Image (spheres, coloured by chain):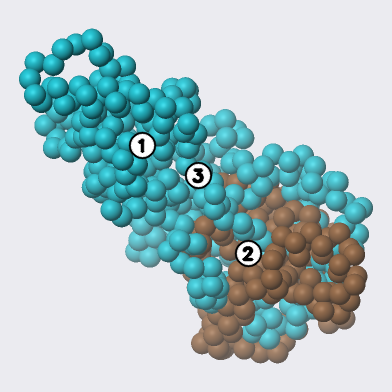
Chain colours: A cyan, B brown
Amino acid sequence: MGPLVPDVISNDLNFIIALVIGVAFGAILEQAGFSTSKKLVGLFYGYDFTVLRVFFTAGLVAMFGIIMLDHWGYLDVNLIYINPTFVGAAIAGGLIMGLGFVIGGFCPGTSVCAAAIGKIDAMYFILGSVIGILIFAEGYPLWEDFYKAYNFGGIRIFDTFGISQSLFAFILTSIALLTFWATSIIENKVNGISKPVIRFTPYYLGLTAVGIFIAISAFMFPPKKAGLLEMVENLEFVNSYPLNEITSDELAYRMMERDKKLQVFDFRTSDEYRKQSLPNSILFSIDNFFEKEPNRFLSLANRTNVFVANDEMVERKIAIIAKELGYNNIKILSGGIKTFDKLILNFDNTQTPQNKVEETTFAFREKASLVIPEMIKNNKPKGGVEKKLKRVVGGC
Amino acid sequence: MQTKYMNPYLAGFLLGLLLVATVYITGRGLGASGAVKSMTVQVVESVTPNHAENTKFYKEYLSEHAGSPLKSWLVFEVIGVLIGAFISGLVSERLNLTLEHGPRINSRIRIFGAITGGLLFGFGAQLGRGCTSGAALSGMAVLSSGGILTMIAIFGGAYLFAYFFRKFWI
């Protein structure tokens, strides 16, 4: 599950990847024509909208791609870098950059690109940006307060507008298509030519088809999680699904033995968990299956993972979802925590054993009913798994 | 010979896929100005280490970036950009030491414009926490409010000021 850094790919290997990604980035920008300032500023004078087309298309494809990966459970968006929102600095900085764009004819990425193929103006642009950074650094105390003011953190645009992600994606796509159409008309007018604005060449149709496929797969099919949740609503299916169980007695025994391989995942609410929880148990939720850090916990080798909840049916449903997601060493607690409470924690020692087996069982339960509450009392609840432990630090 | 550029929608599509791959692999987007910043901080640190130690901006930067400022993801990425663009220019026969400028200005004004524009971009990218790649494009990809706001300000600002500098270009 992504992002692959730093677990699958080490931080050092990441530098090599940065280099490879950079090569592709530079090649695409250069091939698109971003290595000439005349083409870049054409956008602002209406004679060449290449930049807008490339930029907007890239933004849309990337947006849909990320939504799609998230939707199918391949990328944990909680771990990716979301640029923080500092309203004042974002607007002021953006306006200054806009001014720099029309005066200098480049932006930092394109200037590097243009300098690489020998554009002398681009080299001066880079020199200028070094000076700009020095000025910012030297005068930092003067604008530090403004730089750090109006901080809204890593919020996302659909939350800001209070709409759903899909609606925002739809609106943005519509705006993009309208813009592509309108700018083609403007371009024709400014250049005094008459290229057809919409062309149904196989080429464009192909690109559009792939675009539509990505967009559809990002929204139309139910996400993996929703599909699984729906699946476990079928009680017949849930009851016939083979699952390994662990009895209250066995669980109690292994706890008292302090079995290192035992991992208890508690699926109750955090309030219930905080009130009373089994020794060394971890607070967990279905959402955690889809998050990178918690799910690492669940994939540790050679563990017996016991899922506990108030009643067995809930445990069953959750265990089925986990198994469908590919986790195999899972057991559910027979009868749920309720049964464990009744049989072990609140063992009724007034009943008389009917046979030899019951005699040993009751003796064990009596002992357990004294030891385990003590263990629970001395145990500090571990709580949930820290999710944002390794959020990538990024930024420009 | 008129060198032909790639179809813009195809280029955008490829760039978008590259950005998705970048986010999937590394959890972060593309960028550019950050590399220039690392380079600048490194130069300041080497030339006047005392100054770097006593100035708040560098101090903050150096404490956030343990190790050398040059050992940063963006620096490696931008070195890649240089290589990639060079290869592309080589393949498409666009390698040329030239200075481009509009028909109504001379080279000296173009150089002045390039330095001033770079200066503004360098400054603005610090204030706005990223440039067209890092804040605007990558911000749009992850739907960050701040990134999209910066994007609107960059392009809106450029349209706002374009009229006054038309002599530079057309």
The picture places residue B119, in percent across and down from the top left corner, at: 83, 67
> Callout 1: residue from which chain?
A
Nearest the viewer among A23 and A394 is: A394
> Callout 3: residue from which chain?
A
- Which element type, helix, strand or loop, lies under badge 3? loop
The picture places residue B23, in percent across and down from the top left corner, at: 50, 58
Residue at the spot of label 2 = B31
Q: Which three-letter amino acid code belongs to the residue tagged 3? A: Lys
**At x 76% / y 65%, what residue is drawn?**
B62
Residue A338's quadrant in the figure?
A: top left
Residue at the spot of label 3 = A387
> Callout 2: residue from which chain?
B
In this rendering, the answer to whether B25 lies above or below B1 is above
Rounded to the nearest angstrom, the CA distance separating label 3 from label 1 is 16 Å
**Which mark lies nearer to you, 3 or 1?**
1
Report the residue that reaches farthest toward the top: A350
- Which element type, helix, strand or loop, lies under badge 2? loop
Q: Is residue A331 left or right of residue A60?
A: left
Nearest the viewer among A304 and A251 is: A251
Q: Are marks 2 and 1 on the same chain?
A: no
Q: Are marks 3 and 1 on the same chain?
A: yes
Q: Which three-letter amino acid code belongs to the residue tagged 1? A: Phe
- Which element type, helix, strand or loop, lies under badge 1? strand
Q: Residues within 10 Å of mark 1 (few under 14, many from 20)?
A: many
Q: Mark 3 or 1 closer to N-term?
A: 1
Residue at the spot of label 1 = A265
Residue A189's quadrant in the figure?
A: bottom right
Q: Which quarter of the rendering shows the C terminus of chain A? A: bottom right
**At x 32% / y 44%, what residue is drawn?**
A259
